[in-house]
Image (cartoon, rainbow, N blue to C red):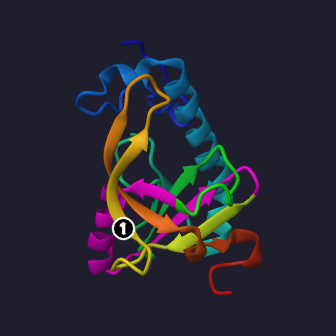
Amino acid sequence: MSNMFFNDGRRGNFKITSGNRSNWNNERCVADRKLGDTTERYFLPILNSWFNTKFDIDKSGWRVFDLVDKRNKIAVEIKTRRCKSDKFHHTMIGESKWKESRKLGLKGYKTYLFIKFTDCIKFMQFPVMLQDGMFIKEGGCYHRGKPELKNHLYIPMEYFEDFRDYPNITD
């Protein structure tokens, strides 16, 4: 295994799930990780200003949420998609993200999901309970060399707000 590092010194090829070991060493996986890291770095100052806070960015690659502010109890997950926001009726996120958002909610945190699509940025506050049209089902991707399947929360796009419509979190 090589010692490849991405933005801010975070290792890019070590986040390995059982049975998918070879997936994190191929060209597409490296490109996906770099894209995600670039998006997180881009978002950090924007979301610090938007939430009027100072987030800690995850440099390990192991934390469930990308940005966390323990003082104001805010956690943000950022995803990047290589499609337009209207391509699918639902977007999916790992069930573990939703479960962690529920745990953080019990500790008083507000948790948010931001998705950068090719045409816009959408966001929503993670739901505590599944809303109409949301469901959990096995899914994943096949474009990294092997199937990467796990349980995902499928969220209808109608639950997302357009980021540019909100100058800050209080609007």
Name the amino acid, label 1. Answer: Phe
**Compared to 71, does 86 lie above or below?**
above
Residue at the outermost top position:
2
Magenta residues (range): 91-119
Q: Horizontal and vertical percent for residue 28? A: 54, 25
Whether residue 1 is visible, yes or no, is yes
**Observer-nearest residue: 116 or 13?**
116
Residue at x 72% of width, y 78% of height: 166
Residue at x 33% of width, y 80% of height: 129
Is residue 107 part of the magenta span, yes or no? yes
Residue at x 60% of width, y 57% of height: 88
Circle 1 is placed at which residue position?
A: 135
Q: Please tell me in which quadrant of the rendered image residue 108 appears.
A: bottom left
Q: Horizontal and vertical percent for residue 78? A: 54, 55
Query: Which image quadrant: the N terminus?
Result: top left
Q: Is residue 28 left or right of residue 167?
A: left
Q: Horizontal and vertical percent for residue 152? A: 36, 55
**Compared to 93, does 113 lie above or below?**
below
